[in-house]
Image (spheres, grey):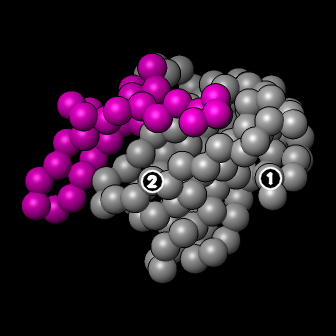
Amino acid sequence: MSGVVLHPLEGRLRGDERGWALRPLEAAGLEGRVPGDLHVVSLEPGAVRGNHRHDAVEWLLVMEGRVEVRSRAVEGEPISVRVLEGPRPALLEIPPGVDHAVRNAGERTVYLLAFSDHPGAATVKVPME
């Protein structure tokens, strides 16, 4: 996927009959560091968030559901599309300068936890059509 890294979460997820638990900062190698930005967003079916790039690494934890992740590492190159689906989370690392957007491709609301280790990272809007 164009610049975006999907980090395996095997061995990091704890779960039982109640569901799963994960320490996302630990999984991202940021444990003990205060994120520069940390926020949770929801995506209604068909909705898109992103269409931008940052000058710092951004991490996205897709809680569950079906999402389409679009990315492009170099302006002018084709947009790469990857579909993530499942009842367990997926952790994405988006390097600085990578254009990206996430679309809810499912029928239920999807929740994303977004964080960065760089406070005040600049965001530039880009078309991802």
Kind of residue indicated by mark 1: Met
From which residue to which does the magenta span run? 1-29
Q: The C terminus appears in which quarter of the rendering? A: bottom right
Give the number of callouts: 2
SS under mark 2? strand
Image quadrant assignment for residue 91: top left
Horizontal side, residue 15 vs residue 117: left or right: left
Q: CA distance from mark 2 to mark 1?
A: 18 Å
Residue 60 shows in this picture: yes
Q: Nearer the viewer, residue 64 or 29?
A: 64
Give me the residue at 47% from left, 35% from top.
Answer: 6
**Vertical comparison of 70 with 64: above or below:** above
**Vertical comparison of 95 with 83: above or below:** above
Residue at which label 1 appears: 128
Q: Nearer the viewer, residue 1 or 38?
A: 1
Give me the residue at 52% from left, 38% from top.
Answer: 92
Instruction: Return the x and y of residue 44 as percentages of the image width and height.
Output: 59, 75
* Disc 1 packing (10 Å; few <14; some 14–19; many ≥20): some
**Residue 3 colored in magenta in the image:** yes
Q: Nearer the viewer, residue 105 or 35?
A: 105
Kind of residue indicated by mark 2: Leu
Give me the residue at 41% from left, 45% from top.
Answer: 90
Image quadrant assignment for residue 52: top right
Give me the residue at 64% from left, 55% from top.
Answer: 102
Say if mark 2 contacts mark 1, CB within 8 Å.
Answer: no
Residue 84: mark: 2
Residue at the limit of the structure toward the front, as seen here: 78
